[in-house]
Amino acid sequence: MNPWDENTVRRTRFDYPLLVAVVLLTCLGLTMVFSSSAVLAQERFGDSLYFLKKMMLYAVLGFGLMYLVMHIPYYAWKKVVYPLLIVSLLIASLTLFSGWGVTVGGAKRWLALGPITFQPSEIAKIAIIIFMAYSLEKKSDKMDRFTIGILPNLIIPGLLILFVLMGKDLGTSFVLALLILILLFLGGARTKHLALLSLAALPILYRLVTQEGYRMRRVLSFLNPWSDRYGAGFQVIQSFLAFNEGGVIGKGLGAGQQKLFYLPEAHTDFIFSVLGEELGLIGVVLTIGLFLFLLYRGLRIAAKSPDLFGRYTALGIVVLVGVQSILNMGVVMGLLPTKGLVLPFVSYGGSALLTLLAAMGVLLNISTYQKADTPPMFQTGARGR
């Protein structure tokens, strides 16, 4: 049931520029997944289209899911905040404590249910965004008080982060923690409280890095990749070579060399390096431009949202895409220590693509509601139907 009347809220069309940006990024992802994985797929599975076929299936399912979600009134998600959290905690615990958990690359981050394999942490991202939006709206006038405004927003999401950490997925844990911190800031939490939280987290982060030898080697190789050029620094050095070879216009789609078993995880974590080699600086700038445009449209949608829940949900989705994009690009460009994080919409990965497209469905639905007094510059579509 619509909680507003026509005098306060105006219905508009979906934000089509946002939808176009999502489609373009997904198509770019399909193209780069094929280009970066064809040789590996032929070598490993005897089918050069193996990864492309799976990614196309994920894309079709994802757009179908997005279409369904974009027709669900966004305020209806308030009713499933806690069930969504419970489901997220349940599947995260199954990953850790049941025989269905699958370990990949030393991290137990996958859950296999028959032929279906997915990452529970992807669902956790959406659950945390919905919970934070609900909580920030509910406590909007108490956010300057640590025990009421901040602490409850740390406990429940903190359990999800703990489960992800127990699966040795520090990268996703960092993304979730940063997502919560940014949303708390946007929700009106005092800067002093957030600064103290960040300082308190530093010893924990230091311990998590130093207790695992491979994490420490990655940090040291980040400072000087050539000190371990055939070990922890190998990936980023090959990434540097890919960008260098690409130059301004690139070597041409499919003509890259670094993906030929020189650059590990070429179709997932380091797909942006392949893009840089094959499409050059022009392709890199255009890709970054697409992400910036998507984030800009998301911020416009948040600005005209008729209530705080819609605003914080939109902001959470924008922050999630923005943080993951920045971290992935930062890693492949050598600006951040190596960590296994995919580039949204572009990297190979079914769980990530399905979750992101569903989140875009929520964002598109929010775009159909705007305050009646929204300035013209923030309006996202024609007048209501």
Image: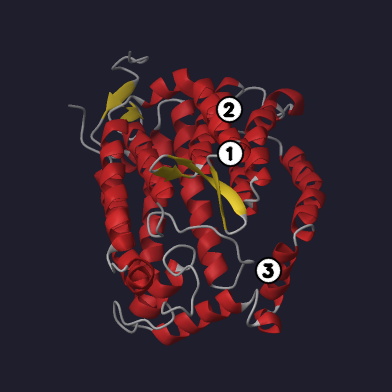
Residue of label 3: 218
Mark 2 or 3 closer to N-term?
A: 2
Q: What amino acid is at disc 2?
A: Leu
Residue of label 1: 183
What residue do we see at 33% from left, 35% from top? 367
Q: Seen in the image, is 339 located left or right of residue 19?
A: right
In the displayed structure, 154 sits above or below 200; it is: above
Q: What amino acid is at disc 3?
A: Arg
Number of marks in the rendered image: 3
Q: Which of marks 3 and 1 is in front?
A: 3
| Quadrant assignment, res 372 | top left
Residue of label 2: 136
Q: Where is residue 232 in the image (x, y as percent from the top left)?
A: 65, 73
Question: Are circles 1 and 2 on residues that touch, CB within 8 Å?
Answer: yes
Q: Where is residue 93 in the image (x, y as percent from the top left)?
A: 60, 34
Q: Seen in the image, is 27 located left or right of residue 76?
A: left
Q: Which of 161 and 326 is in front in this view?
A: 161
Alpha carbons under labels 3 and 1: distance apart: 29 Å
Q: Nearer the viewer, residue 154 or 166?
A: 166
Q: Tag 1, which secondary structure?
A: helix
Q: Tag 2, which secondary structure?
A: helix
| Mark 2 surroundings: few (<14), some (14-19) or many (≥20) residues within 10 A | many
In the displayed structure, 68 sits above or below 15; it is: above
Question: Are circles 3 and 1 on residues that touch, CB within 8 Å?
Answer: no
Q: Tag 3, which secondary structure?
A: helix
Alpha carbons under labels 2 and 3: distance apart: 36 Å
| Mark 1 surroundings: few (<14), some (14-19) or many (≥20) residues within 10 A | many
Q: What amino acid is at disc 1?
A: Leu
Instruction: Quadrant for the N terminus, please.
Output: top left
